[in-house]
Image (cartoon, rainbow, N blue to C red):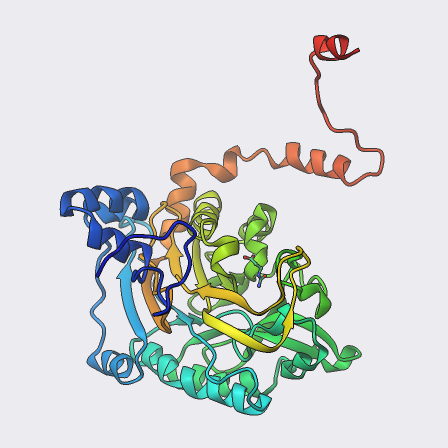
Amino acid sequence: MDHMISENGETSAEGSICGYDSLHQLLSANLKPELYQEVNRLLLGRNCGRSLEQIVLPESAKALSSKHDFDLQAASFSADKEQMRNPRVVRVGLIQNSIALPTTAPFSDQTRGIFDKLKPIIDAAGVAGVNILCLQEAWTMPFAFCTRERRWCEFAEPVDGESTKFLQELAKKYNMVIVSPILERDIDHGEVLWNTAVIIGNNGNIIGKHRKNHIPRVGDFNESTYYMEGDTGHPVFETVFGKIAVNICYGRHHPLNWLAFGLNGAEIVFNPSATVGELSEPMWPIEARNAAIANSYFVGSINRVGTEVFPNPFTSGDGKPQHNDFGHFYGSSHFSAPDASCTPSLSRYKDGLLISDMDLNLCRQYKDKWGFRMTARYEVYADLLAKYIKPDFKPQVVSDPLLHKNST
Ligand SMILES: NC(=O)NCCC(=O)O
C-alpha cells in the first residue's frame, strides 16, 4: 500500500487517509529500521530506544478482540526500583469506539447498541486484569452537540442511571474501577445537564463525579448550548489502585486545569475526549504528554472514532456550506508518562482497547529528579492571577521609549 499523505489530509474513499492507521504505523512502514528506532526514541521517550516493554495478554482477551474486531494493544512503562517503597504497578485501560447505529435510529436502540458493542471490549479489559478503565467522552451517545438541537438532551441520564448500572455490574465482576463520562441530568436540581465523569469503584459503588470544567466554543463544538462549566472543582478520587482524576476533553487546552488536578495529588489523569482531525490532530499528542511531564503524573488520552452523520444540516458560522457531520473523530488514544515517554496510539479508525502497566512510583521519582513542584514559584503566579482577575489590571509591559517617539 502507498503511504503518502495528501496535502490537505483528506480522508480517502476507503475511509483512511492514504492507508495509514496511526502515526507510528506510518513511520514504521516508511522508515528504515535504524531511522525508525531513532524517531521512536524521540517520539515515544526514554524506554523506546529499547521499545516499551510488552505485556503478555491472556488468550481470552485476544480472542474477544478477534471475534469482535477491535484493536487490542498493550505496553508497559518502567520505573526504577526503590529501596524504601515497593513498586505500585497498576494496569490501566482506555477504550475508544465509534457509535453502533446511525443517528437516525431510535435513541434507546442507539444507546443499547453502544452497550452491546462495548460489553466484549470491557470484558477483554476485565479478563486482561485491568485495574482502572476509562471510556470516551459522552460514550453513551452520538456527539450531537454540533447540531444545537434540543432533542439530543434525551440521552442525558442521572449519575446513577442506566449506563452506571450497566458498568457497576462489570466493575464488581472484574474488580475494576471504571471512569464513565456521560451527559448527566441532575434530577434534584431542576434537571440541569452537565458533561460528567462518573467514578465507579471496584466494588461497583459510585465513588463520585466530576463535571467538565471548560466548555468549547470552537468550530462545531457547540457544547455551551447543552451544559454549563462544571461546578465540581478539581477532585482527585482515591481508589484502591491509586489517585485518579478526569480532565474532560477541551480542558486539555488549559494548563491550569491540568495543574489543579496535580496540586490535588493525582497520579493518573484521564482525558476522555471527542475531537476531530481538522481541528486538533496536531495538538493531540503534544498536550497530554506535556501535561504528564509538567505535572509528574500519567495521562490517559481517549478519543472516539468514526464520522457521525446527523439528519439535519448545520453550519459552523464561518460562511462555509452547511454540512451533516462533524468530520472524522481520529481515535489515537494513548498513554503519556511523567518521564516523557508515551505509548504508540490506537488506530485512527478502529474501536480499540489500550492497556498499560504503570508503576505509580514514577510520579515521585520524576518530582525528585526535576523538582518542578519545588521550583514552580506558585506564589509569584498566585499574585499575578489575583491581580489579573481584578477590573483595574494593567498588563506588565515595558515599551521601548523610542517606539512611541518614532510613531508620533
Ligand atoms: N468535546 C470537546 O470538548 N471538544 C472540543 C474540541 C477539542 O478540544 O479538540
Q: Residue furthest right?
A: 392
Task: Please say whether residue 222 is visible from this viewpoint.
Answer: yes
Q: Position of residue 40 (x, y in %)?
A: 25, 47
| Camera-nearest residue between 14 and 392 | 14
Residue at x 49%, y 76% (from the top left corner): 201
Above or below: residue 329 compared with residue 34: below
260, 15: nearer the viewer = 15
- Ligand 1 quarter of the rendering: bottom right
The quarter in which the C terminus is drawn is: top right
- Quarter where residue 13 is shown: bottom left
Q: Is residue 278 above or below residue 92?
A: above
Quick one: 163 or 4, which is closer to the camera?
Answer: 4
Q: Position of residue 253 (x, y in %)?
A: 56, 50
Q: Is residue 199 visible?
A: no
- Residue 382 lies in what quarter of the image? top right
Q: Tell me which residue sits at (38%, 72%) in the image.
A: 131
Using the image, determine if residue 68 lies above or below residue 50.
Answer: below
Residue situated furthest front in the rendering: 321
Q: In the picture provided, is 344 more to the left or to the right than 277?
A: left
